Amino acid sequence: MKKEYLMAPGPTPVPPEVLLEMSKPIFHHRTPRFRQVFGEFNEFLKIIFKTQNPVLTFASSGSGAMEASIINTLSPGDKAIVIIGGKFGERFSLICKAYGISTIDVELEWGTPVDPQHIAGLLKDNPDVKAVFSTLCETSSGIVTDIKALGEVVGRTDAILVTDAISGLGADDIRTDEWAVDITVGGSQKGLMLPPGLAFMTVSEKAKKMMRNSKCPKFYFNALKALKSVEGSDTPWTPAITLITGGKKALDIIVSEGIDNVIARHARLANATRVGVQALGLELFALAAPSNALTAVKVPENIDGLQFVKKIRDEIGITIAGGQAQVKGKIFRVAHLGYSVTYDVLIALSGIETVLKELGYDFKAGSSLQAAQQAFLQ
């Protein structure tokens, strides 16, 4: 018998009580019952995003909200700065280009953080920039961006700051209003402990003003329609009812724990994971600013990174993620995200040790577990 463990950075495990909530009979969405559920769900989202502004919900993956953040605020021919430190920053740039928006791509070496003062210089040299697109946790490299510093820079200009917090939400701190983030984007299948299928988008007053002048084509992802509907705890189009009812339960769990406590829990899990893999002589990929959501680790030179990820999944039953694009086969990524606790980290480290031994990597057995346990005890 083999037991499966999901420790990739999305989708993440779903708590049993959330699965039970979603197994209940479906009901109609144009009813007071749904509006009550959706209204409470929206209030929970505001707590998670740390905002007093509306949070829109779309029945899509997080990429849908990324697209919505662009097409509702910009027009063809507008100029935007896009910070690219991995595949998901790159996605913002690709969506912009698809709608005829000119981008200044700030391409970073994967695993290194952006310098906010560099963005300040670009904004000074390009006063016609309408938006700056950033990523809280760049899932492909495991790095976290200093969104607070970016908010201080962008907030002094007429441009809006848009942040993809899809994988970081609930793990890395994001203070949407306090840090002057105009649009924060989220997704259901990461730290929010839900299956894929919901995307979220906060809207500041500054962003709302830009939406009234946006000329990009839009229909389903029309934020102004969604803003009007959300005032009455409703949606312009058919919502994903089951995911929203399950989402209310999942967010209730998070809010009951306390969002700052949830972030602190993720920080403890991340620290123990980092300490554990380093005890094996492995090197972290994102040294400067590692995320709490996942840990990216360099594969030892004598180990086949693709084989390692495959063996730990197929033979041990632990699903982690490999590298993407230029780091494919060179790193592996372990998530400690959402419905995760101390023993999930210890299980992951145990599986990593087992497969590394089988592939011929030399280390003292149990060293990662001992280091991680010491980190938890401290």
Image (spheres, grey):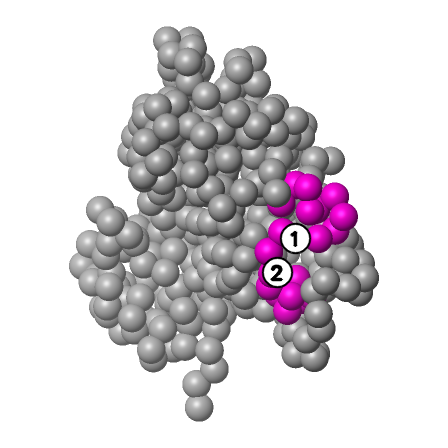
Q: Which residue is drawn at 47% across and 82% down?
A: 3
Compared to residue 342, the image places residue 268 above or below, namely: above
Compared to residue 292, the image places residue 315 above or below, namely: below
Is residue 342 among the parts visible in the rendering?
no
Left or right: 47 in relation to 360: right
Residue stretch in magenta:
226-246
- The answer to which quarter of the image holds residue 318 is bottom left
SS of the residue under disc 1: loop
Left or right: 177 in relation to 354: right
Q: Is residue 238 magenta?
A: yes
Which amino acid type is shown beneath numbered disc 1? Answer: Thr
- Total residue callouts: 2
SS of the residue under disc 2: loop
Q: Which residue is drawn at 49% across and 46% down?
A: 219
- Is mark 2 in CB contact (under 8 Å) with mark 1? yes
> Could you tell me how far apart the alpha carbons at marks 2 and 1 are, in whole angstroms?
7 Å
Tell which of 77 and 169 is nearer to you: 77
Tell which of 170 and 355 is nearer to you: 170
Please name the residue that numbered disc 2 is placed on: 239
Q: Where is residue 217 in the image (x, y as percent from the top left)?
A: 43, 38
**Residue 235, which numbered label?**
1
Is residue 56 among the parts visible in the rendering?
yes
